[in-house]
Image (tube, rainbow, N blue to C red):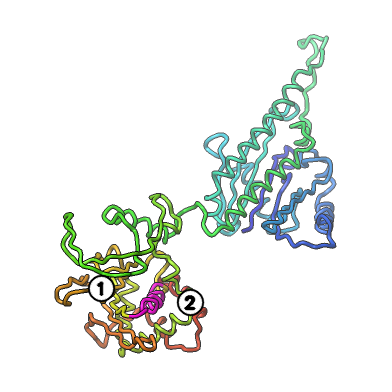
Amino acid sequence: MNAACALQHFCEIHGPQILLCTEERTYIHDLNDIDNDGLKAFYAQYIKTEHSQARLECKSCTLSSDVILASTTDSINRMLYISSSSTPNQELFKNIRNACVRSLTIEKSAENGHPVLFGDDASGYCLSLTFSCKDFHARGSQRLYSLCYLCNDRYHMISLMRVISDCMRQAVDWLQHDADTTYEQEARIKVNVTTETYIIRPPPRLPLQRMLIDVAHDSNIAYRIHALFVWILRTGHSVISESLFDALPTEEQTTKQERHDACGNEYGRKDRSTTVIESSPVILTNNIPDYFTTKLYSIIDSYNTNDNDFSDNDDDYDSLEYQFSSYGCKALQLFRDFSQKLKNIKYLQYILYNWIIGNQLIIKYTNSTNNKEIIRAITSVFRLFLPDGCCRLMETTDSIPSYEVNLILFDTDLILTEPDEVEVNNDNSSIIIKIIIDNIDDSIREAKLETLPVLKSDIIVPTYVKTIIELLADNSLDDEAFEAIITHHKIKYL
């Protein structure tokens, strides 16, 4: 993330000028380079050659009479922050110069003391806070300055806008406070004029060019501003390095929250049974239709009950039991065997097509032995085909509507009655697959599609489905390559 901070001033002679800019660089520790002497020497030589003698003689265009070059090393994040009056990075200098001119001339906030955000994708974005400091020797008794934070990512800028704005306002407050104190002290010093002003008018007082250290009467102001800029850049860097940060919610988080709001009141519990011990028929009488349920001793995933939380804890279906990475090559081989056992490529196209458009998928299986791990491995491949957060899975024999759960694992061994006495959750759009596991070698003995499609020769198969089938047929791909290609294509098409 390329970001930088800058302090600028509007000189009455030379116009908008950059006083100090702080940039971040990747830090590589060198035992032979103590305190980054080589890098500092390079910056010092660049500053010396780039600045003209006329500008160095103008006190208003410089922050201090000495050459300013300060650096701070962040060994934890491996970043180096360098502050100087200019930068050898020509692209960064162009963006800072552009922000300097715009912030001190045309970009003004409608409310006094509020920052303004401007920029574009080509030249980056800038958050600018323009302020004035009182100066007894300046034209109009005030000087115009600007604090800027530059970044090439608009969403990153918006997410940090409040924090950076508050930090800039605090810096402006202490700068203006120091300048006001100096202004009041200088205003008390008056020249005793013995001659009446109506006889001899005193000559007009020409404005003097003064450095900011003289305006604020603080010789360490350059290092204070450097510390401020380093804090802002470190905050921005630490936030952008996190996997999640408080910003605009992604499409996945928005979908998750919408489903939670729509279905959370009707189904107050968000649990998934993970281990079945025994089954027995129970009749429920609390205003619920009679159906067979099971006695379960299970491990229930905990979840965050905060409705406004977009964290991963809100999704109980992201368990490692259904992650493709937990099974890898085993899951890929089982799914290839499942595709072959269907004995019809159009059946596989029909299943994948309905799965990616959001229809409910019901997988019926037998659990006479430890077949659940095999079913979960196959389920992890189905889950891989959808974007994160779009797979709502439940192991149950209850009737669950398709808008609540789009993948049901149905253990047929839990049913104690005849099949015609059991109400199977089968609406018009549900796809039912029956998988029979061979108890001898733990392989798929039979895979059957119970909801047969109307097979037509002119059926349209989406490109994403064709890509999945081609990848399944390519035996040269391992599990990591298969997962990477599927992730790329589902981002592209879904």
Q: Which mark is residue 16?
A: none
> Is 212 placed above or below 345 here?
above
Circle number at residue 414: 1
Looking at the rendering, the stretch of residues picked out in magenta corresponds to: 369-383
Displayed quadrant of residue 215: top right
Please state which amino acid type lies under the numbered disc 1.
Answer: Leu
Crowd class of label 2 (few under 14; some 14 to 19; many from 20; radius 10 Å)? some
Q: Position of residue 354 (x, y in %)?
A: 30, 75
Residue in the foreground of this view, choosing between 72 and 269: 269
Which mark's residue is nearer the viewer, 2 or 1?
1
Taking the spot 84% from the left edge, 57% from the top edge, the residue there is: 34
The circle drawn on residue 483 is: 2
Position of residue 378 in the picture relative to residue 213 (left or right): left
The image position of residue 220, as x and y in percent, is 78, 38
Tell me the element at label 1.
helix
Image quadrant where residue 413 sits: bottom left
Whether 18 is among the magenta residues is no
Q: Position of residue 368 (x, y in %)?
A: 31, 80
